């Protein structure tokens, strides 16, 4: 869709188009939700202030609030963490589920806040609320933070609902696998740098021998 495509670019004109769409009172809930998430992905400086008011918009299934929370998470702005954590304590189970999804997105993007997000998601997984439990387990699978292993094991072992147990198990498998792609790339970069340094030293020795 157009909004989703606009969210893939960091250009100011794309963000302006999405902001204009959000100002359209005739947009459907689903269109508004897509625009909120897309605007967050542009990481435009105006995104947080534009998205924040939509946290107060009522809609079927809390889809607009969920879109606003996920949009805020995609901005990667450290200031939105408080908003996401506050939403994770909401009385509405659907709203907490939306916050769980957003915490997964935010923690995945912003490594320095990943552990805090994982800790809150672990609390949500063990607290009441079917949707928020599922959302928390799914978000922990995204974060893959080792600190969540014991909580996921507990949920898999003790939860009465099979859907939650299964989601917790799938998250546990993901966490144990680790952030392999990220870690693998870093390891490869380190190996390349080491080989380049060794090659440089070897070439230096060869040059010195040639001077004798």
Image (cartoon, rainbow, N blue to C red):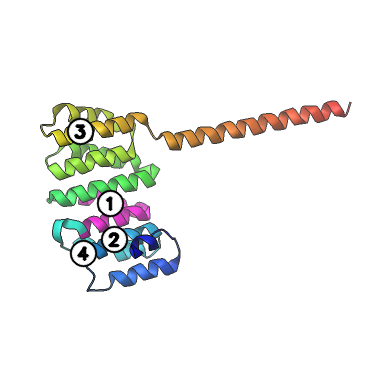
Dot 3 or dot 4, earlier in sequence: 4
Number of other residues with Cα within 10 Å of mark 4, as a class: few under 14, some 14 to 19, many 20 or more: some
Tag shown at residue 34: 2
Q: Which residue, given by chain and number where applicable, does mark 1 sit on?
A: 82
Q: Which residues are magenta?
A: 64-87
Disc 2 secondary structure class: helix
* Tally of numbered tags: 4
Q: Secondary structure at mark 1?
A: helix
Closer to the chain start, of discs 3 and 2, is: 2
Q: Is residue 88 visible?
A: no
Q: Residues within 10 Å of mark 2 (few under 14, many from 20)?
A: many
The label nearer to you, 2 versus 1, is 2
**What residue is shown with label 3?**
166
Q: Is residue 59 rendered to the left or right of residue 8? A: left
Instruction: Please tell me which of labels 4 and 2 falls first in the chain.
Output: 4
Quadrant of residue 45 within the rendered picture: bottom left
Label 1 crowd (10 A; few <14 / some 14-19 / many >=20): few
Q: Nearer the viewer, residue 38 or 78?
A: 38
Percent of width and height locating residue 206: 80, 28
Q: Are marks 3 and 1 in contact (CB under 8 Å)?
A: no
User: What kind of element bears circle 4?
Assistant: helix
Q: Position of residue 205 (x, y in %)?
A: 78, 27
Q: CA distance from mark 3 to mark 1?
A: 30 Å
Q: Which mark is residue 29?
A: 4
């Amino acid at each position: 869709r157009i909004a989703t495509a606009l969210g893939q670019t960091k250009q100011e004109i794309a963000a302006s188009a999405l902001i204009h769409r959000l100002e359209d009172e005739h947009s459907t809930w689903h269109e508004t939700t897509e625009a909120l998430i897309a605007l967050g992905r542009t990481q435009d400086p105006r995104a947080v202030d534009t998205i924040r008011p939509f946290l107060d918009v009522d809609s079927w299934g809390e889809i607009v609030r969920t879109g606003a929370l996920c949009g805020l998470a995609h901005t990667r702005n450290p200031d939105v963490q408080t908003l996401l954590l506050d939403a994770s304590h909401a009385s509405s189970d659907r709203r907490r589920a939306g916050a769980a999804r957003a915490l997964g997105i935010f923690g995945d993007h912003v490594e320095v806040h990943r552990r805090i997000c994982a800790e809150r998601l672990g609390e949500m997984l063990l607290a009441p609320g079917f949707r928020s439990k599922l959302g928390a387990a799914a978000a922990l699978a995204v974060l893959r933070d080792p600190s969540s292993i014991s909580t996921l094991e507990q949920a898999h072992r003790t939860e009465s609902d099979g859907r939650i147990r299964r989601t917790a198990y799938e998250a546990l498998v993901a966490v144990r696998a680790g952030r392999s792609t990220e870690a693998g790339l870093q390891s490869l970069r380190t190996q390349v740098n080491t080989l380049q340094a060794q090659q440089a030293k070897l070439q230096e020795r060869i040059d010195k021998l040639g001077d004798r």
